[in-house]
Image (cartoon, rainbow, N blue to C red):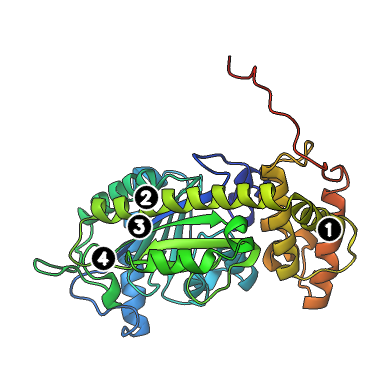
Amino acid sequence: MNLDEFLISPEQSARQRGPLDRIVMSSRTRLARNLAGMPFPGWAKKADRQRALELIQPAVENLPEMAEHFSAPMDALSSMEKQLLVERHLISREHAAKNAGSGLVLNKAETISVMINEEDHLRMQALAPGLQIRRTWELIDHVDSELEERLPYAFNPRLGYLTACPTNVGTGIRVSAMLHLPGLVFTEHMGKIIEAVSQLGLAVRGLYGEGTDASGNIFQVSNQITLGESETRIIGRLEKALHQIIEEEENARAVLWERNPKMLLNHIGRAFGILSNAHTISSKEAMNLLSLMRLGVDFGLFPDADSGLVNELFLLIQPAHLQKHVAGALTPEERDIIRADLLRNRLAHVSRPLSQPPPKDDTQGK
């Protein structure tokens, strides 16, 4: 089975629901592990990396959680297939650059992804829609425990799990959530939030992690400290910070609507106008305009659209997904044209935004 046949559709992926997914788009827990007695990938020769791959790959494939899986060495995947996986957050940008001696094992639900010989021998992650940090931790902790019975981990009684990067030593855990925060960006409070979470030992990054910008007002919030703290304490601190950020975002949206609704309606209306009429549009512009449309959906201004549609478009307009759409390579200029065509077609049935949110139905839930 090839990757294209295995991956769930963008529509199915984008329409998965989870707690507080109005703001929290997804949650992830990642663990870094290495094998004892073997050089870490960054220092390993090709033969050593291949030996590690041959040891790890079958151990992962035989896990009960991976009963139905896609497994491949990275040199068997095309550049476009690798980029597709990056755009779906199933592998890192760093792993997409790997070739011989590195590999991937992915389960059918796309909830568990194991990168072999990325920066560490094992980078395993669990993903879930909405705010489900503890759920992703439980999933990947179970996978990790099963693998530890089959593979000799590099572990030091004093330091914990040994990793290629000192910042991962100890638990080797990275927990993160992807949040849509247009309210905080518009009210210019995002800088204050970044400063506050940094003081808690947390990091705020862009859409694809470290070194990327926050296209579409989408930010990743994750822990930075792994040494000297338990996994539950790290998760608890992140969850507390996330709930505070969610509250701040909701307040920022309320302030925007109360103080200057015409400004907000103008931005959302113009965004929809461009998205539904443009004949060429860049990825960055489309992401930022879709962010405004998603905000409009959250306010109830698009009765015949939902956040699932916008989430799907966030994905479909990415370079690899566009090239998959046309089954061929595209230049940047051609991508801008195809992207605009796709947006016009998908938004043709969506009516222009309302001038105010519809009244809430107080009888619902009674």
Q: Secondary structure at mark 2?
A: helix
Amino acid beneath label 4:
Thr
As measured in the structure, the alpha-carbon distance from the residue carrying label 3 to the one carrying label 1 is 52 Å
Amino acid beneath label 2:
Glu
Which-is-in-front pick, marks 3 and 4? Answer: 4
Of pointers 3 and 2, the one earlier in the residue sequence = 3
Which-is-in-front pick, marks 1 and 2? Answer: 1
Amino acid beneath label 3:
Pro
The mark tally for this picture is 4
Q: Position of residue 351 (x, y in %)?
A: 87, 42
Instruction: Give me the residue at 84% from left, 62% from top.
Output: 340
Instruction: Give me the residue at 82% from left, 68% from top.
Output: 281
Of pointers 1 and 4, the one earlier in the residue sequence = 4
As measured in the structure, the alpha-carbon distance from the residue carrying label 1 to the one carrying label 2 is 35 Å
- Disc 3 residue crowd, few under 14, some 14–19, many 20+, Cα 10 Å: few
Q: Is residue 331 visible?
A: no
Q: Are marks 2 and 4 in contact (CB under 8 Å)?
A: no
Residue carrying label 3: 58
